[in-house]
Structures are given as C-alpha cells and as structure tokens.
Amino acid sequence: MHLTTLLSGIAMGESPRWHDNRLWFADWGAQEIAAVGVDGSRERILATPFGLPFSIDWLRDGRLLIVAGRQGQLLRQSANGVLVVHAELGPIGPGAWNEIVVDGRDNIYVNGGPGLIALIRPGGAVRKVADGIDFANGMAVTADNSTLIVAESHGKRLTAFKIGVDGTLSNRRIWADLVSGAPDGICLDAEDAVWYADVPNRCCVRVREGGAVLQTVAADRGCFACMLGGDERRTLFILANEWRGMDHIPDVARERTGLVLMHEAPAPGVGWP
C-alpha cells in the first residue's frame, strides 16, 4: 500500500494523538511534545525536564497529560504551562510506566509497571485494575466507553476488558491472537477493526476481532504507533523509527530517523484516544 511522508527528522517519535486538527506526538529523543499539521508544519509544544516522555493524552477539559514513565508519575500541564504531578504511579508497581488512554468519562488508564494497568479516577484515586499483561503497549477504548483493548507486545495478542461504571476492568478475553504480530500502538475504527503498529515486522496491520487480517501497510523501518486523524479521521498516521534497542535511543535520536507517514484508511477513527 502507498505511504506518503508528512514529516521527517524526528529524533524518536511515539504516542501519536489527533487533537485540535493536528497530530501531536511525544519525541522521546528530543525530550519534547510536538504537533504537526497536515501541511507538514511542526511546532514544539513543550520540552520535558525528564527523559522519555512516554505517552500523552488529554482530560476532557483539554488539560494535557504526560506519562513520565521512569519517574513513576503522571504529569498534567497547568494553565501557566508548568507541569505538575497528577498522580503517583510508583505505589501501584515498580518499573517504567508506558501508555495512557483517557476515556470519555475521564477515567485514565496507564499501563506498565511491569504488566499492570492502573486506573486514575476523576477524583484522583489511583488503583491497580489489571495485571499479568505480557509487555503492555498501546491501549484504546471503544466509543461507548464499554471496552478497553490493550496490546500485549510479547504476548502477540490484543486483549479486551469490560469497563465497569466505576472504571474497573473485568471479563478479560483475547480480542485477537496475532500469531506472529508484535502490537505496539493501536487505534480503533468505525468498522470495529483495530489498527496496530508493529516494530519488528515493520508494518501496520488492520485486524478484526478474532484476528482476521484485513489490511497490511508495510514500511521500511519499525512502526511504533498509529492514529486515525485528518479530515473525517480517515487518514492513518504512522510513527516510524529505526530501532536498535532502548540502549541505542541516543544514537537513533542523533540520526533523527523518525518519520510521520500517512495512508488513506478505509474507515474513520472512533473511540479514545
């Protein structure tokens, strides 16, 4: 399938989000949050005072959230631009925290820890709602706020949970066995399919529940995350980077191998993020 390049020269891009008519993303290598318009114009939104701003999302009132994974914190940008601690994740579990999704009721889910999913309720309460995730990566919530889907990269599957009225997760099930797929970032479309990005297989794949592959888009480097956005949310944006392991992020960052790629999607994006 044909891919076009919207933006190049990214140090190490992750966590794409369509917000305010632009694609926002975390540039790990540059330690910043950036946004790019469909015309290719890039803006540096903010620099982070810590390395590896793992992922981003927004509260429903528009406040930006950033996962400071190695610090075990979820940060919030205040009205004056200063980052403040929104939640402490360290007490939930050790290790780096990774992906975030905020549903339509302001329930915040953050995974990592390792193998955990933490819930931060609108009132600020933090608790563990799932464990045993085999290297948790991208997450998405259906448009009706009823289901959370998480990518288990080492488990080579997408796993779904029912979301309770209080944000609790239950009824865990395998949504799709991907066989040889290694899902990283994910997003949902209006035909109840999931797009997942795959680093080792250098592609993005669209699958149905049950695992049937509907479409594969190949790239020349690892695909870390994807997001549907643009006009009517019918453009698949892919963040792709060379990958040589966590220890070599500084080398890749210096070379700025990261790209934002675009592909016309068959169905518009829905749900959260």
Image (spheres, rainbow, N blue to C red):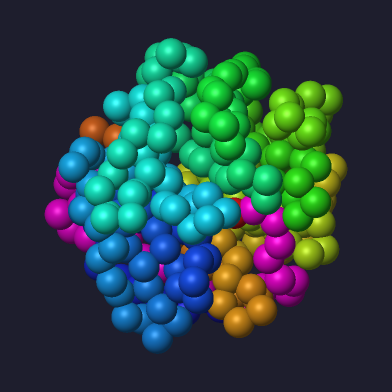
Residue at (52% x, 65% y) in the render = 18
In the displayed structure, 230 sits above or below 217; it is below
Residue 21, placed above or below residue 273:
below
Q: Residue at x 52, y 29 (%)?
A: 124
Measured as percent of width and height from the top left, residue 174 is found at: 78, 32
Which x, y percent locates residue 224?
A: 46, 51
Q: Is residue 250 magenta?
A: yes
Left or right of residue 86, residue 209 in this image: right
Residue 170 can be seen, yes or no: yes
For residue 189, side relative to residue 74 (left or right):
right
Looking at the image, which residue is at 67% across and 50% down?
Answer: 104
- Is residue 76 rendered magenta in the image? no
Q: Quadrant of the N terminus?
A: bottom right
Residue projecting furthest to the bottom? 39
Question: Quick check: can you spot residue 180?
Answer: no
Identify which residue, 130 or 1, lies in the foreground: 130
Residue 39: percent from left, percent from top: 40, 86
Q: Is residue 193 left or right of residue 196?
A: right
Stretch in magenta: 249-272
Name the quadrant containing residue 22.
bottom left
> Residue at horizontal 49%, vertical 39%?
99
